[in-house]
Amino acid sequence: MRIKIIGVVGAGIMGRGVSLSLAQTNHRVILVDISSEILDNATKELREYIRMQRLFQNSDDMPSPGEVLDRITLTTNYELLREVDFVMEHVTEKWKIKKDIYPKLDDICLKECIFASGTSTIPITRIASLTNRAQQVIGMHFMNPVPLKPVVEIIRGHHTSEETVEKAKKMLGQMGKEGVVVNDSPGFVSNRVLMLAINEAICLLEEQVSTAEDVDRIFKSCFGHKMGPLETADLIGLDTILYSIESLHDNLKDSKYRPCTLLKKMVDAGLYGRKSGQGFYNYSD
């Protein structure tokens, strides 16, 4: 049976991307965040992304921005999630924020509803402990930009049932994506490796070993990466990178995940990357 209505909690970069991918594959989406201002900004960003997609892909078959946005209900009211069968959470990568979300969802949503966390580093088993449905809690780590990335990391928590894993795979299949299942560990596979590489690249910059351009050029030219580590950091958001590395450091207690001083300084300065217009590169022009 096709899951038709999906709740998405968090209208940031990842929440918007997931909502767009769902709407473009004929799903109804209820996108929840804490303020009308955030939701208004999300609507503008979604409309612009769809417009750019149509421009570059030049396809008359693509639905119009209005058609896609009509499938997304933006709201600050969690009660609208009462009838959904699947919730994808994409709030800020901070435990003190996430830990208040799940008990609320647990009270509101149907008992059969699956909770899929988009966390980058927080263990799924810990998130599941906030609910009375640990067997129905799973990790679904989408990559950015969501509409363009065909593979999603699925994380099986300690109590996650096989039925929940299969439903998560089916949900991704409905979105035209493939899931790769891994077991629960801080950072899982992708971010356990990626955040370490990005942090080390920032340290190289801080030590004046190389420029941002040349660090990225080496990874693209020598290893065939489409983006270098510092370009990737700007795309993800340096604030999110810092939260993720701090989470890995807290969970694994390994000094190799100690955040680079330059990264912390840039976040303090509000230099978050693409979303702020300035990071390792300038995006304000």
Image (tube, rainbow, N blue to C red):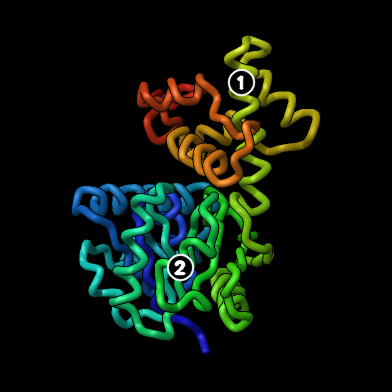
Which residue in the structure is indicated by mark 2? 129
Q: Tell me the residue at 61%/76% (across/down).
A: 165
Where residue 4 sits, quadrant-wise, is bottom left
Name the side, left or right, on which 37 lies relative to 262.
left
Quarter location, residue 216: top right
- CA neighbours of label 2 inside 10 A, class few (<14), some (14 to 19), many (20+): some
Q: Is residue 275 above or below residue 39?
A: above
Task: Report if the CB atoms under discs 1 and 2 are less than 8 Å apart.
Answer: no
Query: Which disc, if any, is residue 203?
Result: 1
Look at the numbered disc 1 and give the secondary structure of its residue: helix
Outermost residue toward the top in this view: 208
The mark found on residue 253 in the picture is none
Vertical position of residue 45 compared to residue 135: above or below: above
> Does 180 appear above or below 107?
above
Q: Residues within 10 Å of mark 1 (few under 14, many from 20)?
A: some
Question: Residue 148: image x %, image y %?
Answer: 57, 53
Q: What type is the residue that disc 2 sits on?
A: Ser
- Considering every residue shown, the one lying at the far front of the view is 253
**Which one is nearer the viewer's eye here, 279 or 66?**
279
Q: Secondary structure at mark 2?
A: loop
Q: Amino acid at mark 1?
A: Cys
Of 265 and 87, which appears nearest the observer?
Answer: 265
